[in-house]
Image (spheres, rainbow, N blue to C red):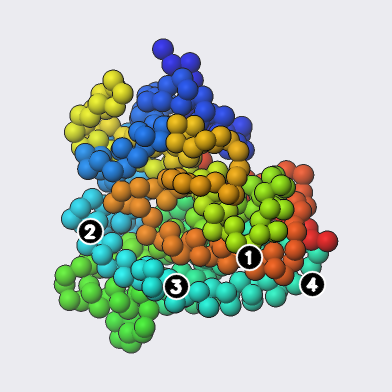
Amino acid sequence: MATVQFNPFTPEAKADPYPLYRSLREADPVHHSPLLDLWVLSRHKDVTFVLKDDRFSADRRKSTNPLAVQARKLQEEGPFAQANTMLSADPPEHTRLRGLVGKAFTPRRIEEMRPRIQQIVDTLLDDVQDQDEFDLIEQLSYPLPVIVIAEMLGIPAENRAEFKRWSDDLVATLAGPGTTPDAIERAQSSAQEMASYFQAVIAERRKEPRDDLLSAMIAAEERGDVLSEEELLATCMLLLAAGNETTTNLIGNGMLALLRNEDQLDKLLGDPSLMDSAVEEMLRYDGPVQATARTADADVEIDGHTIEKGKMLFVLLGAANRDPAAFPDPETFDITRDDNNHVAFGNGLHFCLGAPLARMEAQIAFRTLFDRRGKPKLASDEPEWGGNFILRGLARLPLAFS
């Protein structure tokens, strides 16, 4: 009988979920949660197995799990009712969607964006140049990825306060069974506002195409070979929400890890060539996405347990990234770590499309901040966590510079 229960909704788990993950890995790595009526996997080998195996579907609508039912209820009145996104589609739909959007995220296209990303970071840091203290989340890690993805889509970045409200409301519904009716109502309202906004922009682009991702998606849709109107709308909304939440959390969580491990911060300040491996360690150590879901398309056995067809699984990316079977000394934050085979961006067909962009944004943000301001200190006693257990990130991170 399992001696540990998976409950990520407690204040303790929100502040630090890693002791819970460790208990699961050690006591019950293929854990059935009565609370959520799903299977929870915490070992690196099991997580990668499920993410790569085509017997596990990304389409949450196939499950009878309470979380899936809640998600469907939310979709019924929203713009996602008729369309899957890349996040929740299986081949061949996933192949079509990703093939189109992926053209904007090739390594060459991302590299071409480097000067503009540098310019955005410089402008954001200019705004706080005379301040001894500022909030990293508000001033840098939130606006940076929102401006970048808005410009890629071809929509005005000055609407970013609305983008954040819409995105925060949608993400709040990931909180699980504890999601309040008010939160669900806000999410439905924001989804409708977001859909109306994009419908208007799409109509404009149909009349006057531009050199942006949205115009490219419309052109493909009009050829009839890639996107439906609903898929176009859902993809725009997904890119805007996913494009800001995850990179914001990467930069915030990464900075907190450096501040709490001063030896590693000093090492990075002393040797900026470690920046790439430092960002990979930030992703492993306290990644922005802690879990993702799959539904079994067939009965599958994992470590002596039969996962029945239609059952949902939570694969804990954050737990897999601290698995001692995959990483030596996994609880240690080490920016020089070699062979860092983390799953912060997932694995398999649904490996995060925006991974190269997120990496670049984080590298430029940290490098420029340290070059311009030197060594930061934490300007509050206790960081304030926001979001929920799936998208783990800080609401605020006040920094002080001497």
Q: In the rendering, at what x and y percent does residue 127 appear?
A: 70, 74
Decide which of tag 1 and tag 4 comes sooner along the chain: 4
| Image-based side of 210 in relation to 160, left or right | left
Cβ atoms under marks 2 and 1 closer than 8 Å: no
Q: Secondary structure at mark 3?
A: helix
- In the image, 149 versus 351, the foreground residue is 351
Asked if residue 137 is positioned above or below residue 207 in the image, the reply reads above
Q: Secondary structure at mark 2?
A: helix
Residue 367 numbered tag: 1
Residue 381, quarter of picture: top right
Camera-near label (1 vs 4) is 1
Q: Which residue is mark 4?
A: 130
Decide which of tag 3 and tag 1 comes sooner along the chain: 3
Which residue is rendered at x = 49% and y = 32% of the image?
324
Residue 215 numbered tag: none
Asked if residue 126 is positioned above or below residue 385 in the image, the reply reads below
* Residue farthest right in this picture: 402
Q: CA distance from mark 3 to mark 4?
A: 31 Å
Q: CA distance from mark 2 to mark 1?
A: 35 Å
Residue 333, quarter of picture: top right
